[in-house]
Amino acid sequence: MHRILRASLSSAMILGAVIALSACAPEPEPTPTQTPTASATSTPEPTPTGPVPAFGGDCAAVVDTAEIAAGMGEDMSFWEAAWVDGADAGMGGVRCAWTSDQYLSGFATVWAYPAAVLDPAYVSGDASNSCETEEPFCTISQVFGDTWVGVQVYSDWSAEQIERMRPVLAGIGERVSEYPTPMAGDLAGWWLPVVTCEQLASALSEAGVPSTATDDRPVPGPVFVDGPRARGCTIDVTIQGEQRTATIHLDAGAGGGLDSVLALDPSQRVDVDGRTFAYAGEQYPLDGNPGLILGSDGVNLVSILRGDWDGATALDAPILAAVLSALEA
């Protein structure tokens, strides 16, 4: 537009000069030159660093409770966690749970994770699409794009119910593409794989707390490429001259659970030997809601089922401190 205006203005000036100075020939108008413009450069999109949880970490986006109830063939309620640990989101996943409205009748769990964080042998093997031998757990799963989705049923008739959950799995898969591709975050410092109970007992013994593992319970669910992420242990320990049987749960990447509990109720804080612990109820409360004591190394979570006999609770915190010290050694 500036060039058009310049051209019009020059023409008017030349015309005025011809009229006023008819004896003089007008000087030729200089040829306008174009000013070079800088070429536009596109700013590259920042590379996401994660974590990016599947379905935005929102269970309501994963599946509706009514769909779960229809698949299970009974009334179900969403089972909300009493406190959040952040481990699923840290791996780019989401975990959602439902419980039957009939007392302890049945449970359903849905997981969605980036397929890349799961053990390929698990994804393609029978374990992710079968019923556990002599266990009332049944699982079905499928990979949709870059997202693995698993559905698990726990009940007395899980084999029958899991078949009715196949349309639920398919419906979840249809919604995967509506959300950003999930991606794990930085897993540095995670206990992957989480130690076995024998390894924990050995580490405790080496640290001066004689211990013997009597039970090792890997947590049912997805198997990750770096190995199990959570484990339950029953360990006999001798501490402060007394022998106790401790029920210990190890959960990689779940250290945020301690912060979550303290944010909900700061009065549950317990300070022992320079460490901060917290008393808490079960993450997914059931009948009785047995008490736990939680501790963290800043990344991972250790929980111990609190004793409620013979004053054993006085040893819960020292046992927890010993477990964390042994795992950090």
Image (tube, rainbow, N blue to C red):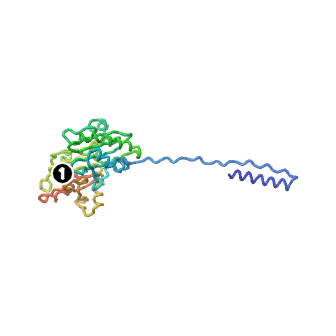
What is the x, y in percent for residue 276?
26, 59
Residue, far right? 23
Specify the amino acid type for callout 1. Answer: Thr
- Which one is in front, 258 or 317? 258
- Which one is in front, 162 or 28? 162
Count residues near mark 1 (Cα–Cα under 10 Å), then give few for <14, some for 14-19, many for 20+: some
Q: Secondary structure at mark 1?
A: strand
Is residue 267 in view from this perspective? yes
> At 75% across and 54% down in the image, what residue appears?
9
* Vertical arrangement, residue 18 with respect to residue 164, above or below: below
Describe residue 286's horizontal placement relative to residue 177 as left or right.
left
Tally of marks = 1
Is residue 329 in view from this perspective? no
> At 17% across and 52% down in the image, what residue appears?
246
Report the residue marked by disc 1: 247
What is the x, y in percent for residue 267?
25, 64
What is the x, y in percent for residue 275?
25, 58
Describe residue 227's horizontal placement relative to residue 310 as left or right.
right
- Which one is in front, 275 or 83? 83
What is the x, y in percent for residue 269?
25, 61
